[in-house]
Amino acid sequence: MTYYHHVSLLTRHREENVNFYTKLLGLRFVKNTVNQDNHRMLHYYYGDYQGSPGSVITFFVVPKLGHRYDNSNYLAEVEWSLPQGSLFYWKERLQQEEIPFTEKDQQLIFHDPDDVELIFTETDQPPLAEDHQVDSDVPADKQLLGLRSIHFHVPDPAKTSQFFQELLDWSTENGVIQLSPQEYVKISATDSTDKTHMGRGSIDHVAFAVKDDQALDALLHKAREQEWHIEKIVSRGYFKSLYIREPGGIRVEFATLEPGFTIDEDLAHLGETFALPPFLADQREEIEKNIYPEK
């Protein structure tokens, strides 16, 4: 059971983004598709070989994206779990690629090309199962295990904690919601009243995993009863999603585990074509014609 499903961010340069997450970090390019809320915008997914929930980071590609300003409310610090005994490998790999990092407490802290703070934490966990390992330059026993934490920066942490407590029965202790031995959510107070401005490297939302459509519908019913700020419930093809704004203003998604990324490509060839879920297939020509140009 994984609690995280995926995390979605904004990037400016698609080739730079693909190279960093596939060649350097060793993730699989799982899906090359489109932002379903803005068909001019590409949407790239990376993850383990299966594109498993909990292993996935996605990026909306916005070529003319400006600088971001993390102020009153924002998500930051994408933390990943590493298998036991792999920290030294990753330290050497970052050094070889001349990527600056900070090392502390079994962690490496560094930034991607869009200035997203990434944290690699060595755990006591074994490597990925063989059918989840990616064919990449990163040895199988050193590959990323999955998302470990996301950090909510909000004006009133107590209200955000109350949201998670009432809707999901997740309790907060000292600013941390411990989801599992390997997964947690961190909640901190911001010290700025200035409006946050999305830009390069902004985290648009974090998605938590829900078992199936029935569980998602039950969560929607509960959210309505508790009068949270529901944005929408929608099928993304690869999963069904419920979007809610927590009291701090951050978008939180709840996404089903299935059907997954093989509805429009087979497992062996994920990410190799420009994929559209079935309900967008008849718009392919128009969508491809209107994608934002890179320059």
Image (cartoon, rainbow, N blue to C red):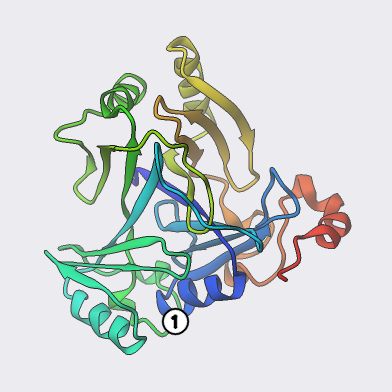
Q: Tell me where residue 263 sits by quadrant.
A: bottom right
Element carrying mark 1 = loop
Q: Residue furthest bottom?
A: 96
Image x and y of residue 18, in percent: 55, 73
Q: Is residue 228 left or right of residue 32?
A: left
Image x and y of residue 39, in percent: 75, 50
112 over 197 or under it: above or below: below
Image x and y of residue 114, in percent: 48, 65
Instruction: Name the kind of residue labelled 1 in the image.
Output: Ser
Which quadrant would the N terminus be assigned to in this image?
top left
Q: Where is mark 1, residue-wise?
A: 136
Q: Residue furthest left?
A: 105
Q: Which residue occupies the foreground of this view, 291 or 257? A: 291
Q: Local crowd at mark 1 within 10 Å, few (<14), some, or many (≥20)?
A: some
Q: Residue at x 28, y 85 (%)?
A: 95
Q: Residue at x 19, y 48 (%)?
A: 181
Which quadrant would the C terminus be assigned to in this image?
bottom right
Q: Which residue occupies the foreground of this view, 159 or 285? A: 159
Image x and y of residue 256, in percent: 50, 39
Q: Residue at x 47, y 57 (%)?
A: 57
Q: How many numbered markers are drawn?
A: 1
Q: Which residue occupies the foreground of this view, 65 or 131? A: 65
124 over 40 or under it: above or below: below
Q: Is residue 181 left or right of residue 218?
A: left
Q: Residue at x 42, y 28 (%)?
A: 246
